[in-house]
Amino acid sequence: MSAMSDYLEGQLRAHIFRTASYTKPTVLGFSLCSASPTDAGTGASQSELTSTGSYNRVDVPPLDANWTAPDATGGLTDNVADITFPTASANWSATVSHCAVNSSATIGAGNMLLHGALTASKTVQNGDIFKFAIGAFDVTFA
């Protein structure tokens, strides 16, 4: 995943090249989407699944304990522990094909920061557990 939202691009541009300061979020809400979010997407406009079947965002805070140190040449960081979504209590509302990182753990809230496609789409049915295994959620700044 390395597509940055328009929101984050603007915040970083103003922070680096202008006088504004960007304060990083204290929450990183991971969401699952049924279609590719656009860079302009925010909150509910990013094809996020609905709360059907216990779906909810997962918060993995921006802490050294949660993310590997970026490598020196490729700008890669990934998750140190599994990112596990709630067990589906019914079939989820749509097939999962994309994901996003948001500044809120509440569905439809906050600003989208990053987004990308999954390697393979997944239909989550009653009793399934959707997760990104250790090291599987890759973010590259290049």
Image: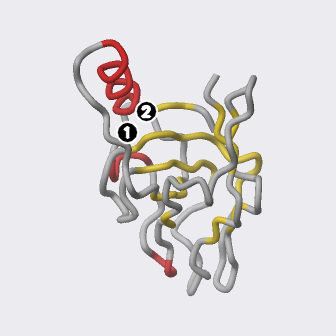
Q: How is the image coloured?
A: secondary structure
Above-or-below relation of 105 to 9: below
59 lies left or right of 117: left
- Element under disc 2: loop
Residue at 76% from the left image edge and 53% from the top image edge? 135
Q: Earlier in the sequence, mark 2 or mark 1?
A: 2
Above-or-below relation of 102 to 19: below
- Crowd around label 2: few <14 · some 14–19 · many ≥20 (10 Å): many
Q: CA distance from mark 2 to mark 1?
A: 7 Å
Between circles 2 and 1, the one closer to the viewer is 2
Where, quadrant-wise, is the N terminus in this rendering?
top right
Residue at 47% from the left image edge and 66% from the top image edge? 57
Residue at 57% from the left image edge and 78% from the top image edge? 86
Expressed as whole percent of the image width and height from the top left, the position of residue 29 reads: 45, 58
Where on the picture, by quarter, is residue 6? top left
Marks 2/1 in contact by CB < 8 Å: the verdict is: yes
30 lies left or right of 133: left
Above-or-below relation of 72 to 89: above
Label disc, if present, on residue 32 of the rendered structure: none
- Crowd around label 1: few <14 · some 14–19 · many ≥20 (10 Å): some
Above-or-below relation of 11 to 17: below
Expressed as whole percent of the image width and height from the top left, the position of residue 142 reads: 64, 22
- Element under disc 1: loop
**Disc 2 designates what residue?**
5
Camera-side residue of 71 and 40: 71
In the current view of this chain or complex, which residue is farthest to the top?
A: 17
**Disc 1 designates what residue?**
41
Residue at 49% from the left image edge and 31% from the top image edge? 4
Which residue type carries mark 2? Ser
Expressed as whole percent of the image width and height from the top left, the position of residue 94 reads: 55, 63
Which residue type carries mark 1? Gly
